[in-house]
Image (spheres, rainbow, N blue to C red):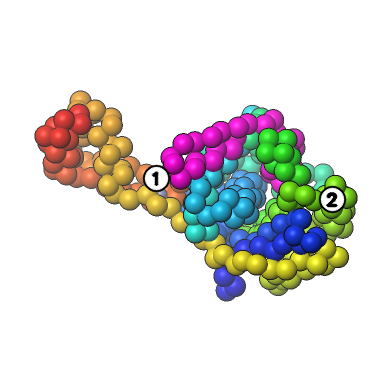
Amino acid sequence: MSRDYAATAIAAGETARIVAARTTNLVREAQARHDSSPTVTAALGRLLTGASLLGLTLGGRERLTLQVNGDGPARFVVVDALPGGRVRGYPGRARAEVPLNAKGKFDVGGVIGRGSLHVTRIFNTGLPYTSAVPLQSGEIGDDLAYYLANSEQVPSVVAVGVLANPDGVLAAGGILAQLLPGADPATIAALESAAAALPQVSSLVRAGLTPEEMIERFAADLHPRVSHIQALSFSCPCERSRVVRALVSLGSDALREMAQAEEDTEATCDFCGQRYYFSPDEIGAILSDAAAEGTV
Ligand SMILES: [Zn+2]
């Protein structure tokens, strides 16, 4: 199976950046981990793809979180992009579903509803910076483009897509194009008309185009030159020691109760669905260690 990766190109005389990605495998993995319905998978997959693309514009050291909150049945979708092309994410209600829209497509805007997009960038100093914009359509691509143009003042075109049938995810991918400083304002119009003329990005992936070929297909007129390739994956850095810290933060009364329970305590990572189990004896040891360190 073709691996997931993104290609970054500089175009229009170094005044535009174009990133294209194939994300089929990572969207498939997200679907399997969360057992999400087709429309929620489309929403989660588009946001994971958008985060993969945006993550590559950040210089590789920042972390990025995208959260869409809406009044639709999915409630929210949250996604992290970590350095190295790693992304993870989960929906509020994985099994939520709505009918297909008037065009016979997954109604991502309907399953999200009206609400807001929150973007948090965590710089390598550890300081988070969050901004929020109202959702334009809840279809994700429009919403990310609106955020970039209005909150970061970077005129951008974003196309993200997931092609699926009842058996699963067939193809997923996206294209992000941004003006760089010094760009001719006519370039954004050229990018917008290129995006309007482009077939759905997920069907390009389905047809077997590589990210480099997607860039060429999207904007050959702007003479793109690929400068960077990055492998992409669904990857969660959760680990048992972090879960232990989360358990300790519940306090000594809660830990004592778990240590006296008949059954193991189960903790699940929201982002990846990984389950962690702790026997009553293990909880007892966590409690006494924490008491010795003065953390409970
Ligand atoms: Zn995890």
Please provide the residue range marked out in magenta. 118-146
- The residue where tag 1 is placed is 269
Residue drawn at (16%, 44%), measured in percent from left and top? 282
- The residue where tag 2 is placed is 184
CA neighbours of label 2 inside 10 A, class few (<14), some (14 to 19), many (20+): few
Residue drawn at (27%, 47%), measured in percent from left and top? 241
Q: Does label 1 point to a residue whose CB lies under 8 Å from ligand 1? A: yes
Q: Does label 2 point to a residue whose CB lies under 8 Å from ligand 1? A: no
Residue 214: % across, % down: 74, 66
Residue 182: % across, % down: 77, 49
The image quadrant that residue 168 belongs to is bottom right
Which circle, 2 or 1, is nearer the viewer? Answer: 2
Res 80 seen here:
no
Q: Is residue 226 magenta?
A: no
Quarter placement of the N terminus: bottom right
Q: Is residue 218 left or right of residue 164?
A: right
CA neighbours of label 1 inside 10 A, class few (<14), some (14 to 19), many (20+): few
The image quadrant that residue 18 belongs to is bottom right
Residue drawn at (57%, 65%), measured in percent from left and top? 230
* Distance in Å between CA atoms under marks 2 and 1: 46 Å
The kind of residue tagged 2 is Asp
The kind of residue tagged 1 is Cys
The image quadrant that residue 116 belongs to is top right
Toward the top, the furthest residue is: 253
- The mark that comes first in sequence, 2 or 1, is 2
